[in-house]
Amino acid sequence: MIERAELVKMLTAGSVTLEFTKLDGTERVMQCTLAEGVVPPTKVTPDTVQTATNKALANVVVYDTEKLGWRTVVLDRITKISA
């Protein structure tokens, strides 16, 4: 399993291909990023800021560059990462 901070660093640097098992058991391949200039601007208010919990730390929110939307990936379900 990759560490969350390491994955976020890769995503911030550019596009990453993630292969993972979805919660329903199906396999998924996703092109995603957190690179500035690629992701759309977000409106964060105090009401939308989530308190860090063990569950939140086990996930990472990424921007799916093919479906043009935000997705949450469970770190321990990732099977392959390609930069």
Image (spheres, rainbow, N blue to C red):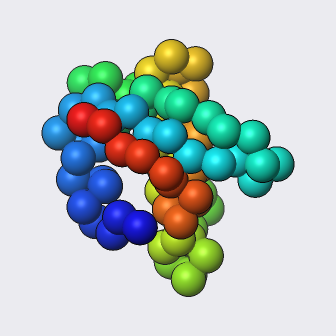
Question: In the shown orientation, is residue 34 left or right of residue 48?
Answer: left
- Which residue occupies the foreground of this view, 8 or 52? 8
Q: Residue at x 78, y 49 (%)?
A: 25
Where's residue 5, x and y in %? 28, 65
Where's residue 8, x and y in %? 30, 54
Quadrant position of the C terminus in the picture: top left
Q: Say if residue 55 shows up in the picture.
A: yes
Q: Residue furthest bottom?
A: 54
- Which residue occupies the foreground of this view, 29 or 53? 29
Where's residue 41, x and y in %? 39, 31
Q: Which of the 4 image quadrants contains residue 71? A: top right
Q: Residue at x 31, y 37 (%)?
A: 82
Q: Say if residue 4 shows up in the picture.
A: no
Q: Residue at x 61, y 76 (%)?
A: 55
| Above or below, comparing residue 22 to residue 14 in the picture | below
- Which residue occupies the foreground of this view, 48 or 13? 13
Quadrant position of the N terminus in the picture: bottom left
| Above or below, comparing residue 23 to residue 14 in the picture | below
Q: Residue at x 75, y 40 (%)?
A: 26
Question: In the shown orientation, is residue 52 left or right of residue 36?
Answer: right
Where's residue 42, x and y in %? 45, 37
